[in-house]
Image: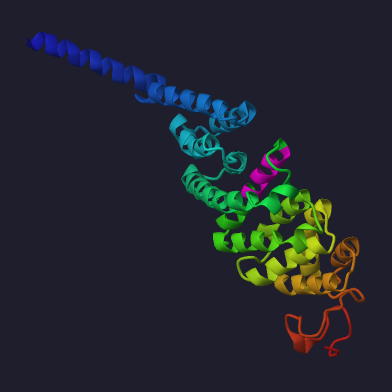
Amino acid sequence: MMKVLNKHIKVIALLVVACAWFGIPDTASGQTESLDKLVERAGNAGIEQSVIDDLKARKEARGLSNQQLINMIEPAVQLAEDNLPANHVLQKALEGLSKGVPDARIVPYINRMTSATRQAAGVVDPWMEKPEVKQIMGGQNESSRSMRNRLVESSSRAITQNVSPENISQLLSDIGKKSVLSKTTGSNIVSAMDIVSDLPMQDQPELTRSFIVRALKGGFEAGEFQKLPMALNMAQKRSQIPASNIIQGVGNQLQKGVPAQDILQKLFDGNIGGGPPGNIPKGMEDNPGKGNRGNNSGNG
């Protein structure tokens, strides 16, 4: 009996040594099977194989385990299985891996994005079902589904940056009024929502909502919304005043009927108020006592 027991112990010891020699952890086969199943689930849910392949290649380059990759991509697969957009979550994981961010930081952020995506869908989907919104967003066709997914993605980015779902809901409610819908298109609305996370929505929600609504009513189109964050950033750098004040200045121009292209050009030129470059309306300066930047001091 003792001889048999000693033989079993020797066999187990040899297996442990072999695993250590070849660098094979005892859970590797199980992890590989789990990863393969997850990849299959991802494909069945409509996630592109090329995205998964990129993540696997980056995981290999970083020397991460299968389980570490599973922890990153499973939340996105679950989103896709629930008919929610998942690509933005996977792209964030890929971005983190590419930049060398530790998986211990990537996974919590992925989980946060996943939760924000579900919250965003809870706001966007009921809004999309409104008859007047359906009419402008294309009903139930493929284009409409694509716009819905982009709205969920953009809203989730804002929520991830601590903009409340209630603020997103109020913004969509403001956009969904007939006075706004009659002046714009579905693609313009999607582009407007794409830049919400680049605007001071968290600090100045009412101002930001009013600005977006005015921009849609004032003729801003998809391409102009895409250029707006860069233009606002340039204006802020040149004027050295808060983004909320710049948005207020743009809102004033929109109210006066200044065309979108002219507003963008003025912002790139550092023109906040619509007058000469550097001119800032009184009361909008970061430090009103210094007057308008770019002009003679003391003329505030």
Along the viewing direction, whichever of 137 and 34 lies nearer the viewer: 137
Which percent across, then down, holds residue 278?
86, 75
Residue 175, picture quadrant = bottom right
From the viewer's perspective, tell me whether residue 128 is left or right of residue 184.
left
Please name the residue shown 83% across and 69% down the image: 254
Magenta highlight range? 143-152
Residue 213, picture quadrant = bottom right
Which percent across, then down, holds residue 296?
89, 85
Which image quadrant: the C terminus? bottom right
Along the viewing direction, whichever of 177 and 124 lies nearer the viewer: 177
- Image height of 19 relative to 266, above or below: above
- Residue 162 visible in image: no
Residue 218, picture quadrant = bottom right
Please name the residue shown 57% across and 52% down the image: 120
Which percent across, then down, holds residue 225?
79, 56
**Residue 150 on the magenta span:** yes
**Residue 22 on the magenta span:** no
Which image quadrant: the N terminus? top left
Total marks placed = 0
Q: Main secondary structure of the magenta part?
A: helix
From the viewer's perspective, tell me whether residue 53 is left or right of residue 251.
left
Q: Among all residues in the image, which is located at the extreme front?
A: 131
Along the viewing direction, whichever of 62 and 225 lies nearer the viewer: 225
Which percent across, then down, holds residue 17?
31, 19
- Image height of 44 relative to 247, above or below: above
Please name the residue shown 46% across and 31% down the image: 65
- Residue 121 visible in image: yes
